[in-house]
Amino acid sequence: MLTIFSPSHRLHHATELKDGHIIPCFEMPSRADTILKRVKDMDLGDVLAPDRYDVSRYTRVHSERYVRFLQNAWIEWLATGSTLDALPLVWPVRELRHDIEPEYIDGKLGFYAMDAGSAITSGTWDAVSASANTALTGMSRIVQNEKVAFALCRPPGHHAGAEYMGGYCFLNNAAIAAQGFLDAGAKKIAVLDVDYHHGNGTQGIFYHRADAMFVSIHGDPKTSYPYFSGHKDELGAGDGYGFNHNLPLPKGTEWDTYGDALDQACKKIAQYAPDALVISLGVDTFKGDPISHFLLESTDFFKIGERLAALNTPTLFVMEGGYMVDDIGVNAVNVLLGFEGRR
C-alpha cells in the first residue's frame, strides 16, 4: 500500500485550552511520526512525499475568505505584538451577527473557529496545506489506477467546515480529496468516518449534495465532542436528503456493538455504489484513548480493514484522530493490514 507523508506536519505544534488550563495539544507531532515508523516496520509499502497543489483545490470545499484567513492569520497576530499561540476569545453565537467578517485578528479568530482547541502558530499554514496536499496526492494516485492509498495527514481535518476550524482541524483533508475525485470524473463518492468524534465539518460540506454520501460511526453527541452535530436525524437536506447517515454509539462501546454499526455503514455505502471511497481514519476508538470513550482492542482494527476491503471499491485512507500515542501506529496500521488481508 502506498503511503503519502510530509514532514512539514511538524511545523504545527500548538497549545489548547483544556479543563481551565492552557496545555500542550493532544494533537501532537509524535502522532504522525509514530504511525510512519509502524508503516515502515511492517513493510506496508512505498512512502512518498506529497505533490504541491494550488489553493484553488482547497476552495473547492472551503470559502476563499476562510483560506485567506488561514494563510494570513499568524502575520496579523504577530502585528498585535503577541508571540504566543493565537486562540479565539469570542464567538458569534446565536443572535449575534455571523455574516460580517471582522477586520481585527481577535475578531477573525472567533469568527472562523468553533472551539478553543485549534490554535494557530507560526507553522500552521505550512503544515495544514501540506496535510491537504497529502490527501490530494493519495487521491491522484488512485485516479491513476492505484487500488488503495494511505494519506498520513496531520493536522487532521474532519472537524473543519467550509468556513471554520475546530477540533485540531483547519483544512478538511477528506472533503478536499473527495471533491478531487469528483473533479477528476467520479460521479459519486462516499466518505466513511470511523473517528470517535463526529466529522461535523465533512457532514456540513456535503449536507446538501447527492454526489457525496457521508456516513459516520461516532460517540453520541449528547455526551461527546463536538456535541452539536452527529445525531441520527441529520439525514441531509435538499438534494442531499437521504445521503447523510449518522450512527452514534454510547460511551463504553466494545467491538460487538461497533462491528454491527460498521456493517450497517458498509451496507449503506454498498447500496450507494460510489466510484471511490474515502475513509476518515480515526483510531481514537481504542480503549484508553485520553479524550475518547470506546473500548476497541488493537486486534479489532484488523476487522475494520477487512470489512472495508469487502466493499471492493478504490479506497483512500485519510488519517484523522487517535491520541494514545504509544499505540496509534499499531492501531492505524492494523486497519491497513486488515484491508490488505494481512494479520
Image (cartoon, rainbow, N blue to C red):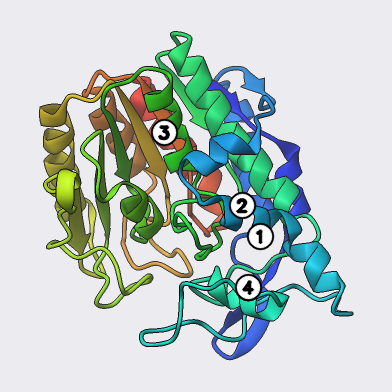
Image quadrant assignment for residue 289? bottom left
Say which residue label 1 marks.
69
Q: Nearer the viewer, residue 342 or 5?
A: 5
Q: Earlier in the sequence, mark 4 or mark 2?
A: 2
**Residue 48 at x, y = what percent?**
66, 22
Q: Which mark is residue 108?
A: 4
Q: Earlier in the sequence, mark 3 or mark 1?
A: 1
Q: CA distance from mark 3 to mark 1?
A: 21 Å
Residue 88 vs 131, above or below: the answer is below
Say which residue label 3 marks.
179
Q: Are marks 4 and 1 in contact (CB under 8 Å)?
A: yes
Q: Are marks 2 and 1 in contact (CB under 8 Å)?
A: yes
Q: Earlier in the sequence, mark 4 or mark 3?
A: 4
Q: Residues within 10 Å of mark 3 (few under 14, many from 20)?
A: many
**Residue 328 at x, y = what percent?**
52, 49
- Asked if residue 256 lies left or right of residue 223, the reply is left
User: Which amino acid, by three-letter code, is at mark 1?
Assistant: Phe
Residue at horizontal 63 percent and vertical 73 percent from the top: 108
Dot 4: element: helix
Residue 5 vs 99, above or below: the answer is above
Q: Which mark is residue 67?
A: 2
Q: Earlier in the sequence, mark 4 or mark 1?
A: 1
Q: Is residue 257 visible?
A: yes
Q: CA distance from mark 4 to mark 2?
A: 12 Å
